[in-house]
Image (spheres, grey):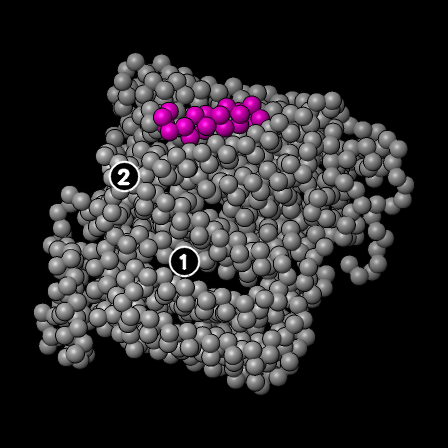
Amino acid sequence: MSENEHTNHIVQPGTYTAIILTLLTLTALTVAAAYVNLGPFNIVVALAIATIKATLVVLFFMHAKFVPRRTQLIIISGVFWLIILLFMTLSDYVTRVDYRGVRFPISQNFSAGLPPRA
Amino acid sequence: MHRTGALYGQFKTLEQQKDTATLGMWIFLVTEIMFFGGIMLAYTINRHTYFPAFAMGSNTLSLFLGGTNTVVLLASSFTMAMGVWSAQVGKKQLLTIFLSLTLVLGFVFLGIKYIEYAQKFHHHLVPGRNFDITYCVNNPARCDDLSPSELEVEREELAKALKADPALNSHAQLYYSAYFGMTGLHALHMIIGAGLLLWLLKESLAGRFDAQYNNPVDIIGLYWHFVDIVWIYLFPLLYLIDRHK
Amino acid sequence: MSTTATAPVQTLPEHHYLNATYGIRSWLLTTDHKRIALLYLASVTFFFFIGGFFAMMIRLHLMTPNGLLLSADTYNRMFTMHGVTMIFFFLIPSIPAVLGNFLIPLMVGAKDLAFPRVNLLSWYIYIIGGCFTLYSMIAGGLDTGWTFYTPFSTVYSNSAVAPAVLGVFITGFSSILTGLNFLVTVHTMRAPGMTWFRLPIFVWSHYATSVVMILGTPVIAITLGLAAMERVFGLGFFNPAMGGDPILFQHLFWFYSHPAVYIMILPAMGVVSELIPTFARKQIFGYGFVAAASLAIAVIGFLVWAHHMFVTGQSTYAALAFSLLTFVVAIPSAIKVFNWTATLFGGSISFDTPMLYAFGFIGLFIVGGLTGLFLGCLGVDMHVHDTYFVVAHFHYIMVGGAVMGYLGGMHFWWPKITGRMYPEWIARIAALILFVGFNLTFFPQFVLGYLGMPRRYHVYPPEFQVYNVMSTAGASILALGYLLPMVYLTWAAFYGKVAGPNPWPATGLEWRTPSPPPTENFEVTPVVTWEPYDFHHRPDLGLEAGAPQGPAVAPAHGDD
C-alpha cells in the first residue's frame, strides 16, 4: 500500500516562469499597499498577499499540487498546527477582562504599573 | 560507504528509496513550520502590544535592501525549480548552471543581510546594553550612511512614537529582538541551504544526476523553497509596518 | 503457559545481531536499529540513575520539616535537576528510543528503519545534549524548576541555566529525528500484506507519539532558544522589565510540554496493548477504537496546554475552553482502559511478570488519569495547583504508568532482545515490591497536597511530617524495586534460559524471527496474511483451532 511520493508529472518551465512573474508582481503590490493607509487592514492585506505567494510556491515550485493525498495532508496538518498555536494563545490575550468585566486592551496586559526603563 | 545513486540496504527498490526520502523531507519541513511558528507567536503578541515601537523599528529598516532581498530570494526559488526540471529531463549542464545561479543568489542575499546587520550594529540598534533608538537622530554625524531625507523620516517617526509610548527605548528593543531573532534564524537556515547546494553542485558536476536519479535535487529544492516562504512572510512583517505617511 | 509447539530445549542461533561484528567501533558506528536501541538503553539507564539520585536527595531532605539536610538553594537545584533529567533524558526517549527502535522494523517486517544513519545521529545528538546538561550539573546545577519559568531563569537565577537549556534544546532534535524516522518507516517500509489495520497497536501508538514529537518539539526548541538568547544576549520577549511577558513564555513552553506527557504515555499504552492480548490469549477488544484513540489523544493533547496556567491570571474564558478540552482528552484514554478490560473478559489469563506490570499500569493510570481530571476542573485547581497533589498526579502517570509500561515491555521483549529468559519468580516479586513501594511513596502525597503542602518548598509545617516519612520509606522500597530488575535482567542476558523465537507465545511479526534476531531481521521478507492478535488461526506459531493450511511465509524469490 505504498503510494508514490514522486509522481512522474514534470512541471514545465513555462509554468515556473508564469509563477515567478506572478510572485514578483505580488511583491510590488505588497510594497505599494504598505504606502496606503488602511488602518488595521494593512496587516490583513500584507498577510493575505504573503499567503497567496506562499501558496503559489508550495503548489508549483514544491510540486504540492501533484503529490499524493497523503503528502498534501501532511502539509495541511503543519499549517493547521501553526494556526492552533497562534489562535489558541491569542484567545487568551484577546479575551482577558478585569474585575469589572471590562475588556483589557492588550497593551495593558503587562506594562501597566511598571515604571518605564530608562 | 555511500555513493550517490546507490540503493541502500534497508530498501527494496530505488522507487521506495525515493518515496521515503521525499516523505522524510516533507515531515522535516513541518517541524520547521512549528519552529518558526513559535517566534511568529512572540512577534504577534509583541507587535500588537507595542505597535508604536514596532512601527518605529520597521521604519529604520531599508526598504530598498529588504525589497531587493525578497526579489533575490524569489529568483533563487525560480532557478532552483528550473534546476529540478533540468535534472528531470536529463539536461546535466543546465542543472549545473541553475544550481550555480541559485547558490550565487543565495550568497547575494546573505551579503545584503550582512550589510543590514552591520548597519544596525553601527547605529546602536542591537538589543542589549548599548541599545539606543534615538542614536541616529541625536548623532547624525555618526550615522553618515543615512541620507538627510532618511534621517528626517526617522526624526518624524521618533517624535510620533515617543508621544505614543514614553518607554519607547525599552519596547523598541522587543522589535529588534524580533528582527534579529527572525532574520537570524532565517539566515542560519540559508547558510545550511547554501551548504547543501554546494554538495549538490559538486555531485552535479560529477554528472551524478539524470532523469532516472535526481531525488536529492528535488528534496534540497523543497528545503530551499521553504526558506524562501519564511522570507515571504518576514518581509512584510518586519519591513512594512506603518510605512504610509 | 507454554504451548505444545515450542521445543523443549532451545538453542541460540549461530549468527545474530549481537555477534555479527565485534569491537567498539562496530557499536559506536552501527546503523543497525537493534544495536542503536541498546545504545539508548545504556544511556537512558544512566540518566535514570542520575535522576534517581536527585530524587533520593529530595526524599531524604523531606524527612524532617525544617530542612536539616540541604539549604533552600540546594534543594531547589535537586528538584530541578530531578525533573530535567527524568523528563528529557529518561521518560521521553525511554520506550520509543529503546523498544520502538528495536521493534518497529521487526513489527512492520522491514530490514531496518527508513533512515538508519539518521537513527544513529539521533543517539549522538541525545548524548551531546546530555553532556551539556551534565555539565550544568557540575557547574553548580540549575534551580529554576524543570519548567524554566521566566524572568527568573532568564534574568535573575544564579545557576547554570544556559548550558542546561542548550542541552535540552539539542536533545529535542534527537526526539524530532526519531519521530521522523518512525513516521516514514510506518508509511513506506511495511512488508507485503502488512496493511494499516494489521499493524500491532504498539506501532499505532508509536505513530501517534511520533506525530506529537514532530509537531510539538520544535516549539520547545524555539522557546528555549529564545530564553537562552534572553539570558545571554539580553533579548526581551519574556522579561517584564523590558516590556516582555512571562506568560508568553509559559504559553510557548506548555504548548510542547503538555503534548510531551503524551509522548511519555502513548508508547507505554502501546506496550500494554501488546501485553494484555498476549497474556489473556485473546484478540484485543475494539482494535479500531484503540488505534483511533491513540491518534485522538495525540491530536486533542495539543489543545489543552493552558490547564497548567489556570492561576496565572490568563483569560477566564480561555481557561474555560482549556478546561473543557482537558475533560475531552480523557475520553480516548478511557476508551483504551475499557477496551483492555474487555479484552480480559473471557480470556485465558496468566500472571507472568509483564502481565503484572500491565495490571499495575492500568490501575495506577486510572488513579493518575482521574486525578488529572480533578486538576482540570478550574475550581479544584485553584486549591491544589502547585501542591503535592499535582506532584502525586503526574508521578502516578509517569512512574505508575510510563515506567511500569517500560518495565513490562523490557521483560516481555527481553527474550527477543537477548535470546534468554529472565528468572520469573524474582521478577514477579520485584514487580510486587515496585507496586507497593510506588503506592507508599506517592499516595500520601495526594493527601499532603490536598491538605495544602506546596511543591518545591524545602520546609513544611510539622503536622505533615508523618506523610513525608511514609513517602520517603516508600521511595526506598521503590528503589529496591528498580534495582532488582537491573540486576537480574543483566544476569539473564548472559546466563538466563535460552528462550527460542516465541516463548510466550505472542502473535507479532517480531516473534517469527529467531531470538536474538539476525542483523537483517528476517531471512526472507515475510508476507502477512493474518489479522493481529489472532490466537486461534496461527499454525505457524503453533496456535490453532481449525487453522487455514499453507505456508505463511512466501518462498524466497531470490530478490531479497
Q: Is residue B123 left or right of residue C212?
A: left
Residue under the point 85% across and 37% down = C539
The span picked out in magenta is: C361-381
Helix, strand or loop for disc 1: helix
The disc labelled 1 sits on which kind of residue?
Phe
Q: Is residue B58 left or right of residue C203?
A: left
By secondary structure, the bulk of the magenta-drawn segment is best described as helix
Which residue is the extreme one toward the right? C549
Q: Name the residue nearer the viewer: B199 or A39.
A: A39
Indicate the quadrant where residue B10 lies: bottom right
Disc 2 versus disc 1: distance between alpha carbons?
Answer: 30 Å
Q: Is residue C255 above or below residue C65?
A: below
Q: Name the residue nearer the viewer: C34 or A97.
A: A97
Residue under label 1, please give it: B36
- Give the percent coordinates (x, y) of residue B153: 17, 73
Q: Is residue B4 left or right of residue C509?
A: left
Which residue is the extreme one toward the front? A38
The disc labelled 2 sits on which kind of residue?
Val
Residue under label 2, please give it: A97
Residue under the point 39% across and 18% down = C447
Q: Residue under mark 2: which chain is it in? A: A
Q: Quadrant of the C terminus of chain A?
A: bottom left
- Give the percent coordinates (x, y) of residue B227: 44, 67
Q: Name the residue nearer the viewer: B14 or B171.
A: B171
Q: Residue under mark 1: which chain is it in? A: B
Q: Is residue A56 above or below residue C78?
A: below
